[in-house]
Image: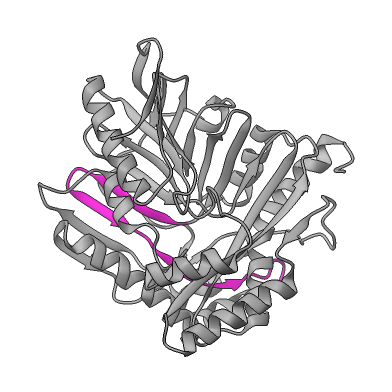
């Protein structure tokens, strides 16, 4: 297996359990953070850095390298952390950190709430207060522009209706000059807005950082238990208008288009996990998940793993990319994405998470995120295209999804007190 290792000093503490540690407050630039509702992991320093070359099957190769590295290290509690790219078209960086702080990372029953709301209880949910600004002061450039994205959706629909594929996810990006974003402030703002999402930060390149607050738990493994919470199907929320917000949620539950899009993801996840499980339970119908800006349809998939089941990262690699970020069939959708999207997705819609020497760990799909370098900020958003899709509505969906990062970045840009240009 081809991999480059960079060694450091032995760890001064492999794992330090903490009952009341603010992981975000403990995070420093260059470290890894993954936190949700006060539980998760934060790291600092490096024992080893492992580069997994670009190419087919990169996530699977990364899992094999991670397993070998942890076994060879022989340190109780050591972990590998990573953010892996969507297509494996650039080298992936895995890190065995020198210092690790973990808080309540292994509850026996994982609550996959993330704003979970039963359809009959939508009225009990109050949208996040406040209104969105009329304009975005950071000077964003779209890639592609809305009209070009709409044309890409039209072409994808023609392919779908010709029977070439069932679903494809197309994305677009916004890029702006970096006005001096403080990463810790941005992470705090994201946590304030969406406290039940997976808050994450990972180094990206020598000077960059990849940060976000993603609602989707791709996979969590603890001993012989595994759980996944695939999301697909989206509706905008309406801050300040609970009645309209409830109507949007109820319309999402009734939407044939969104139910179709969601079912394709759930089937793919269940099929991928079946081979590794003695028992698998799929919720009979999707439930609603609320973030600050959107409603999603979600279905919990829970299983008991066979003794031969691989590590959390290997299982995540078997699921990735799901139809929620790629399409169905995956190979046909991936080829269409490569043709219709003007640039590589990079780390967007890839995997972010950790795995330990026992094979336990947690991996999320890297959505609602930003790649931040000293000079630029880049964010992306996508929409699932199925036969019932309307091009104008898919454009609108990407605009809504952009708001999670744009609104948080705007707040930080205003605090920075500098001209975004």
User: Is 289 situated above or below 139?
Assistant: below
Residue at x 45% of width, y 77% of height: 167
Q: Is residue 196 left or right of residue 95?
A: right
The C terminus, quarter of image: top right
Range covered by the magenta-colored residues: 216-244
Residue at x 83% of width, y 52% of height: 139
Q: Position of residue 155 (x, y in %)?
A: 59, 81
Q: Is residue 312 left or right of residue 350?
A: left
Q: How many marks?
A: 0
Quadrant of the image occupied by residue 40: top left
Q: Position of residue 152 (x, y in %)?
A: 62, 75
**Magenta region includes residue 235:** yes
**Magenta region includes residue 316:** no
Residue at x 70% of width, y 48% of height: 408
Q: Is residue 281 left or right of residue 10?
A: left
Residue at x 79% of width, y 42% of height: 413
- State the residue in front, 118 or 208: 208
Quadrant of the image occupied by residue 184: top right
């Amino acid at each position: 297996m081809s991999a480059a290792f960079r060694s450091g000093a032995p760890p001064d503490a492999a794992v330090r359990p903490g009952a009341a540690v603010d992981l975000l407050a403990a995070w420093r630039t260059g470290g890894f953070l993954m936190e949700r509702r006060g539980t998760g992991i934060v790291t600092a320093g490096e024992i080893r850095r492992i580069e997994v070359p670009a190419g087919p099957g990169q996530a699977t190769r990364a899992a094999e390298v991670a397993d070998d590295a942890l076994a060879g290290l022989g340190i109780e509690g050591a972990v590998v952390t990573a953010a892996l790219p969507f297509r494996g078209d650039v080298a992936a960086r895995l890190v065995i950190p020198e210092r690790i702080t973990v808080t309540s990372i292994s509850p026996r029953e994982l609550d996959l709430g993330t704003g979970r709301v039963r359809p009959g209880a939508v009225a009990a949910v109050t949208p996040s207060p406040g209104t969105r600004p009329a304009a975005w002061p950071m000077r964003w450039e779209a890639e592609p522009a809305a009209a070009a994205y709409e044309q890409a959706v039209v072409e994808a629909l023609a392919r779908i209706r010709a029977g070439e594929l069932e679903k494809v996810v197309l994305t677009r990006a916004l890029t702006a000059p970096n006005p001096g974003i403080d990463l810790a402030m941005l992470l705090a703002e994201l946590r304030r807005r969406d406290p039940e999402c997976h808050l994450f930060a990972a180094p990206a390149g020598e000077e960059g950082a990849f940060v976000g607050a993603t609602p989707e738990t791709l996979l969590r493994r603890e001993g012989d238990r595994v759980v996944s919470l695939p999301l697909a199907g989206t509706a905008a929320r309406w801050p300040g208008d609970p009645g309209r917000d409830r109507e949007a949620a109820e319309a999402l539950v009734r939407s044939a288009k969104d139910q179709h899009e969601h079912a394709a993801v759930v089937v793919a996840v269940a099929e991928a996990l079946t081979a590794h499980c003695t028992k698998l339970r799929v919720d009979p119908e999707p439930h609603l998940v609320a973030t600050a800006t959107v409603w999603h349809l979600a279905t919990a998939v829970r299983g008991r793993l066979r003794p031969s089941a691989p590590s959390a990262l290997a299982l995540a690699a078997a699921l990735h990319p799901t139809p929620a970020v790629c399409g169905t069939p995956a190979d046909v959708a991936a080829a269409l994405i490569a043709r219709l999207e003007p640039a590589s997705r990079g780390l967007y819609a890839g995997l972010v998470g950790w795995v330990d020497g026992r094979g336990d760990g947690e991996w999320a799909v890297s959505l609602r995120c930003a790649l931040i370098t000293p000079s630029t900020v880049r964010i992306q958003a996508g929409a699932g295209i199925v036969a019932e899709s309307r091009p104008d509505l898919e454009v609108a969906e990407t605009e809504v999804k952009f708001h999670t990062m744009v609104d948080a970045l705007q707040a930080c840009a205003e605090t920075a007190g500098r001209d975004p240009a």
